[in-house]
Amino acid sequence: MLDWLPFQEPIVAKIVAAAGALLVLTIVVWFWQRRREAALAARCRKERQRTHDQLQQQQREISELAAQVIATGSTAVIAGFQVVRQIETLFTEGQRSPAEAVEALKALAARQGANAIINLDSQRLPNGKCTASGDAVIVRPLAGNAPDVPAAEIKRGNGEPRLDRRWD
């Protein structure tokens, strides 16, 4: 049967053949597991990339909305502006820095239709996260502070024209 083996005992030849088959089987299983792990890693990378892209899109949306807020103040008035209407008191928490908390609050205010925030307050919590709160309001410039250029030519922070000023 296994005449090419240098062993004369048939039991030894069978043990050597079984060990060889086990070795081949182990190598095949190892390659199969590596292939499965590679496929799983590729799926995980794809999911992380998708999540990253979604977070980047949300961050861009927050930045664009926050740019719509033209003024903020820590008191009930903003110099050079008249409060036309208070919309809602807003609160946000869980951001990494006070600046991020204020930006998120501005985005919330813009979603509510406000163009300013008064009574703005931000804090860092003991757990390291930051909160911000304030009143979303609609303001308009006082008579002497009205911009000299049409609203369509007023630029946002990123240089794009701002067409959605709410003065009334």
Image (tube, grey):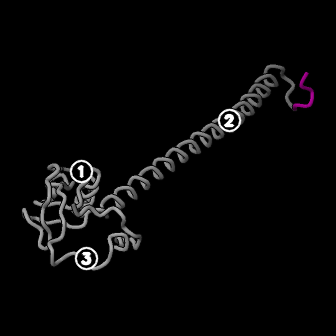
Tell me the crowding category of disc 1: few under 14, some 14 to 19, or many 20 or more residues within 10 angstroms, Cα based. some
Left or right: residue 37 versus residue 104 is right
- The answer to if 154 sits in the magenta stretch is no
| N-term-proximal mark, 3 vs 2 | 2
Principal secondary structure, stretch drawn in magenta = loop
What residue is rendered at 46% in x and 52% in y? 52
Q: Which residue in the protein does label 1 denote?
A: 94
Residues marked 3 and 1 touching at CB (< 8 Å)? no
Q: Secondary structure at mark 2?
A: helix
Quadrant for the N terminus, please.
Answer: top right
Mark toward the viewer: 3 or 1: 3
Residue 147: numbered disc:
3
Residue 32: numbered disc:
2
Residues marked 3 and 2 touching at CB (< 8 Å)? no
What residue is rendered at 17% in x and 60% in y? 117
Left or right: residue 86 versus residue 20 is left
Image position of 99 with respect to 23: above or below: below
- The CA span between labels 1 and 2 is 43 Å
| N-term-proximal mark, 3 vs 1 | 1
- The CA span between labels 3 and 1 is 36 Å
Q: Amino acid at mark 3?
A: Pro
- The answer to if 2 sits in the magenta stretch is yes
Residue 135 in percent (x, y) is at 14, 55
Q: Amino acid at mark 1?
A: Gly
Q: Secondary structure at mark 3?
A: loop
Write the start and end of the magenta stretch as one range. Answer: 1-5
Q: Amino acid at mark 2?
A: Trp
Tell me the crowding category of disc 2: few under 14, some 14 to 19, or many 20 or more residues within 10 angstroms, Cα based. few
